[in-house]
Image: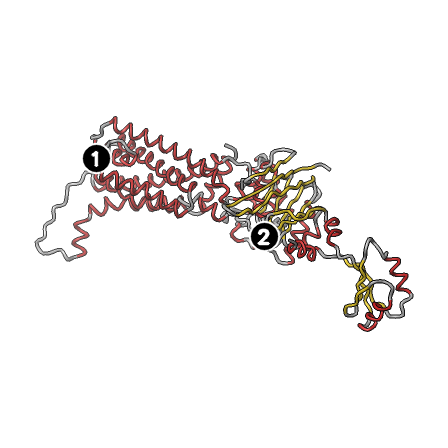
Amino acid sequence: MTILLQVAGLTKQFAEKVVVDGIEFSLEKNTSTALIGPNGAGKTTTLSMLTGLLKPTSGSVKMLDGHLRANIGFLPQYPQFYPWLSALEFTEMAAKLNGVPAKKAQAEAKKTLEFVGLGDDLNKKISTFSGGMKQRLGISQAIVHKPKLLLLDEPVSALDPVGRREVLDLLKGLQQETTILYSTHILNDAEEMTDQLLFLRDGKLVEQGTLREVRQRFEESNYVVEFSTEKEAQLFASQSELIGKAKGSYVYIEIIDEQPSMQGLLQHLSSCPYEIRKVERQTASLEEIFMKVARKI
Amino acid sequence: MRGFTVLLQKEFREAWRSWKFLWIPLVFALLGMSDPLTNYYMMDILNAVGNVPEGFEMLMPELMPVDLLQASIGQFQTIGLLVLMAIFVGTISKERASGMATLLYVRPISFGAYFMSKFIVMSTVGLVSILAGFTASVYYTVVLYGTFEIGTLIASFFTYFSWLLFVIAVTLMMSATFKTVVATACAFAVIFIGQILDALVGTFWTISPWKLPVYGVQLMRGTMEMSDYWWSLSITLVITIICMGIGILTMKKNASMTKI
């Protein structure tokens, strides 16, 4: 795997307040990374520094494969367009400003707009666009010049479930050929299309790694066995040689160093006299992990 | 000057689609025709309104064509410039405040190109506007009063255009440097308070950009001290270029003020 972007000691201080505090990470080519954190964690500030709009107080952002500004596409959280331009005119302008030759620009713009689902609205004025259409246009202006790195600030937060689904599918389609870094606080989205997670809290990078790594670090290692009644659950918990805690009709069995194994548990359960409804190994959702990371001191 | 033609096209589209090429020249044309018409028909207007006392005799001054053009330029200097500056003073600062600039600033554009594209469009609107204003004023003056000498008229027109370029450079520099409200205050202060100061204490010097519009008229009267004229014109052009330079620098420096 080759590294595309290297960020070292990135810090931003506004007056007395340190908004981003010495974060370090790198992005591998053609992977997607989610920048996660509660509101005010410094996600947008970090992205602005990566785009070059905001000068870092200290630290560096290095693209190892070409000049940074020429090779990024950026979608702000609330993209603002010139309302008197049409979708095609705007995307074409974006392409040309990024050095797409004038002859090819219009064709590229058309292709991109069709890709994001605005094929029927090419010549409509942006002033008539709905929120979802603007978000698509925002994506089209960010990808029309085929940037190596795509930076998206809360790309789906402002959309309804249908729009969110569509935009997520669009982004998944881009994953193969582009490196994507996007911020979000909607964790289901991150769960869907992420190779790497970066957790920001109070401007500091408090957790990072692949989804699997972060999960393992935070997983509540538990089996959950569901019985049909509370009483049975309690009886099972008190009689069994496995250490389990009964809670309602569930029994929680802690896993320590991968013991007991699922097989072992099932063998044990097969001799159990009570009716068992469900057995599962509990996986912490990203949301639970998020809550833990956000509160961890 | 990367992206210059693309940005220029965008600026022209904006000015065209928001009818700036139509209604600002229209304002100037109305201002231009008002003085020749009202002066010529003053007696009739007073009679029509009534209230002129019996036996009232008013001595109307004998007006030369150049006096009427000077009056028209006086109108452009106040209301005309007010309109033009008010329309364009937010052209950079408002784009930043609304976040529309963000999608351009993240691209590898040259700020010099962006500033110049705005300068050229505003200058073109200005040129069309004063052309409309001068034409209206001259037309009615010629019909009602008498003719102009064409050579000095053209000289006067371009002298006024040079002053207008100075006004535009100041306006855009303020827009690049400050937020819209402050930019408006500063630009108006430089242009309008500058005019007042130059009129009040300007007798002590003869070379200043604020004197250019008057000098244009004096060219027509033939009373112009040419060395003062050339010095004022040169200084105005130099300050205009300096303002543009500062504007480009501050536009670049303030790029991070754009709303994200």
**Residue furthest out toward the top:** B227
Q: How is the protein colored in the picture?
A: secondary structure
> Which amino acid, mark 2?
Met
- Number of marks in picture: 2
Q: Circle 1 is placed at which residue position?
A: B203
> In the depicted view, which residue is nearer to us: A204 or B132?
A204
Q: Where residue A259 sits: x, y (%)?
A: 84, 55
Looking at the image, can residue B190 be seen?
Answer: yes
> Which amino acid, mark 1?
Thr
| Image vertical order of residue A36 relative to residue A68, above or below | below
Circles 2 and 1 on the same subunit: no
Mark 1 chain:
B
Q: Where residue A18 sits: x, y (%)?
A: 55, 46
Q: Quadrant of the N terminus of chain A?
A: top right
- Looking at the image, which residue is at 54% across and 40% down? A57
Check residue A133 in the rendering and tell me which mark sits there, or answer none. 2
> In the depicted view, which residue is nearer to us: B108 or A235?
A235
- Looking at the image, which residue is at 29% across and 42% down? B193
> In the depicted view, which residue is nearer to us: A28 or B99?
A28
| Image vertical order of residue B209 relative to residue B179, above or below | above
Q: Where residue A284 sits: x, y (%)?
A: 74, 57
In the rendered structure, the answer to whether residue B200 lies left or right of residue A35 reads left
Looking at the rendered structure, the secondary structure element under dot 1 is helix
